[in-house]
Structure formats: structure tokens, C-alpha cells
Amino acid sequence: MTGEAFQQEAVVDAPLIPFDEIVVKTNTLCDKMPRYDRDGVFVGGCDYVPVAEAEITNKHGCYEYENNMWRSQPPRMSDEVVLKGAQRLGEHAGAHSLQDMRVIRHGGEPLLDSAEQVDWFSTTVRTGITTQSPDTNVHMGIQTNGLALAKEGKDGDKLAVLKQHNYQVGLSLDGDREAQDRHRTGPRGESDYDKVVYAAKLLRDSGVTWGILCVIDTDNDPVATVKSLASHEPGSISLLLPHANHSVLPQPGAMSYGDWQIAAFDWYYDQPAESRIAMPIFDSYMDVLLGGLSKHEGVANRKTQELFMLANGYYQRVDTIKSTEPGAVATGMSIFEHSMDDVARSDPGIIARRLGNAGLAKECLECPLLKPCSGGYYPHRFKSGKHRIKITDPVEVFADAFRHPTIYCDDQLKLIPHMASRMEDDLGIHRGTLVEALAGV
């Protein structure tokens, strides 16, 4: 099948899936950007890798800054872009009669903005949506490293604005002091763990809905990590695999990612149900194993409903695809010239990600864990081809680049059956029953 025919078939046969989660990159810069000395030696900030070797500017760093894409963006989103973006959100919500729309401030560090700027943005976005779609419930979210909240303290204006607009807050924290300092330090390499812990206390005491996002490092003890995170009493703990793929392999650690997650899951599963803190990745796998639906974008091949808006007003595919190649993430479409429906209907990268099982590798389609795993998280399936992906490439090119099992396939083959066996023991049914039942669906 030609690329043109492949794309046309995908567009014609698939109903338009509206976007109900919009991530707005309000700020390009971050107070934990990776920093280097004159010789290019890493000094401090966030040092998560990997990204595609061809894009590496230094050997350490957050995927946001380890290629030069961020340099084309303004430091922060202008009022003009916010106003037009809010109009596009309302237009989309109204056209599809969306019951709910979630808008997430992201960066960089989105709390580098002043409290007044965050307040104006929140009011503008909510008004832009509800004016055109009065029945849509608008949910505001934000992802932060917490340093701006810690700097202002319990009576800070930014915390008050987050409460005023009912923000759901995600805080980046990787465990105890040793775990946090391994990859997330201050700009000169100094520990800022106490500041982040203070931010966690402020969030907990404020009454806002909040959770922790933790990137797994297998050199950190899994049980000690989740116990430390749970001690802050967040509403949820999201465990994230590093953004590796078949072209840039995960960094080896003290144990496999599968074994690490099994240990974390066993601790979680053994907690009393009434006091158990939600862990979305585990909860979604268990939901699917019991025949339910996944609420997590990395589980059961859920068709993406997320769209990003950059600080310059361009639409972008899910941000973590930056960890592959620049052409794989950019859409080339702007809010000033294109509607969100235009993106959903015609962007080849979005269409490719929404192909469902047609976008999976042969090995995945033949695997007994097809239903719960479904190839794993999309960016982790990527493998570089003979040519770099371009914005203008057809759907088939995008699909082929991600038509591979997750680079964490061996870990999935350990984790999911283990989770199923724990559940089967509690349900009093034979081991293997849950996976076999899904394989027959």
C-alpha cells in the first residue's frame, strides 16, 4: 500500500477523535535547565537522558533541552497566543460537545510566571472555552518542580492562584534525598531536595489536588522510593520509565526495569485498600486485566486524546516524542491558521498514533499480552530508519517508525503476568486465567 493510500484510508475510515487534554507550553525556560561548564561538562540541573544521538548537544540533560528545538521558542507564551489558543479550545469543545476538557500548563517551568500571569491565563482559557461551549467542564492542571512554590512559602500568591482555579498539580520528585539528588539538583549541582519536600508539604496542607511524578532509576531501591514518595501523602504517584527507544537504549542499572516495577507493585498491592495512594500505571493495568478500560496513555494502546500548544502558537504531538527525532514531534500547523480539527484530520503523526492495532508490530499482535500491553508507551517503540522523519512524510512513514515492540518489552513480559498472578491469587482463580481471558477477546 502506498503512503498516500495508507493515509487516505486512515483519514476516511477513522472517525475524528477530538482532543480533550491540551498541554500548553506556557514557558520554555526552566530554573532546573541542565547547565555545563566551558568544557561541556555537566554541572547541575536535570540530567535525564536519553535522546537520539544525532540530537545530543551534551551527554546529560532533560529531553526538553537535549536538542535545540527549544531555542526556536520564545521564553514564554505571549498574551496574543494565549487568547487565540483559548479561542481554539472553545471552538473545539463546542464543535464536539465535549463534557470535559483538561488544560495543563507545562514548560520548562510554568511557575516562572507571576501569580498575576497564571491567574490571567487561567481565567482567559476558562472563559474562552465556556463562552463557546457552556456545558464543558474545564479542568486546569500544571506540572512543576516546586521551587517557585517553596520560594514563596505557605502564604505565597502562586499557591493561592492554584487553589483559586482548582488546579491539579503534578510535582516532580524521584524519591528520597539520594534518589532526587541523583538526577535533579540545583543549577550548580547543589541539593534542592529540601525545597521540593517543602513544596510537597505546601501542596498537601493547602488542600489542592496534587500528585507526584517520579522517573524510575533502577539504581534507587524501589520499595524505599515508593515509601518515601508515599510519606508526603500525595493523591497519586506516577512512575515513569525513562524515555528510551530502539535507537537509544535505556541506561543499565542495579536491576531490570521489570524487576524494579514488580517490587514497587508488590509494596503497593499489599497496602490496605482504604489507605492506598493511587498509582495510575498499576491501576490501569489492573483495570484492563479485569476487562475494563485504560485511563493511562501508556496502557492498552489507548488512542491519544492529547495535543500540545507551544509557546509560539504551533501545535505539537505528545512532548515525549522529542526523545526520538525532531520531525517526529512537530506538526507544522499553527493556531493562527489551523483549527484543532485540522490537526486531528490531517496530521500524519497524530493519525499514525491513532491506528490502534494496525500500528503495532507483528510480534505484539501475536503476543498473549496484546490487550494490556499493546506495544507499550508509544515513544518507547521508536526506531530510526534510513532517513530521518520529516513533517511532510505520509502516515505510513510515521507508523513504520513506531511499529516496534516497546524497548521495555522484556520488562513488560515480567511485570504484567506478575500483576495478574497476584490478582488471581486474591480472586481464588487459576494463574493465567486473566491473561488467557483477554487473549480470547
Image (tube, rainbow, N blue to C red):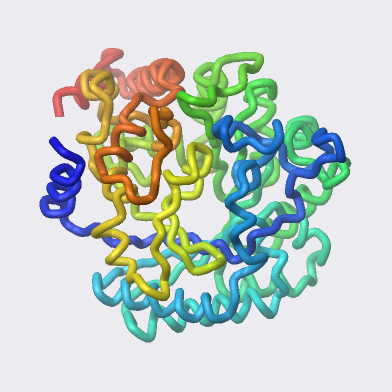
**In this view, 278 is above or below 74:** above
Indicate the position of residue 270 as horizontal and vertical percent values. 52, 27
Task: Work out whether residue 68 or residue 386 is closer to the camera in this orientation and state it.
Answer: 386
Q: Residue at x 54, y 36 (%)?
A: 240
Q: Residue at x 62, y 78 (%)?
A: 119
**In this view, 22 is above or below 114:** above
Q: Residue at x 34, y 54 (%)?
A: 305
Asked which quadrant contains residue 22, the reply is bottom left
**In this view, 91 is above or below 140:** below
Residue 381 shows in the view: no
Indicate the position of residue 39 as horizontal and vertical percent values. 85, 35
Query: Which residue is situated farthest in the front direction here?
Result: 387
Q: Residue at x 32, y 77 (%)?
A: 91
Task: Work out whether residue 382 or residue 159 is closer to the camera in this orientation and state it.
Answer: 382
**Quarter holding the N terminus?**
top left
Task: Work out whether residue 116 or residue 391 is closer to the camera in this orientation and state it.
Answer: 391
Q: Is residue 165 left or right of residue 228?
A: left
Task: Work out whether residue 434 or residue 304 is closer to the camera in this orientation and state it.
Answer: 304
Asked which quadrant contains residue 383, the reply is top left
Indicate the position of residue 97 as horizontal and vertical percent values. 25, 73
**In this view, 120 is above or below 321:** below
Indicate the position of residue 234 as horizontal and vertical percent values. 62, 49
**Quarter holding the C terminus?**
top left
Q: Is residue 271 left or right of residue 389?
A: right
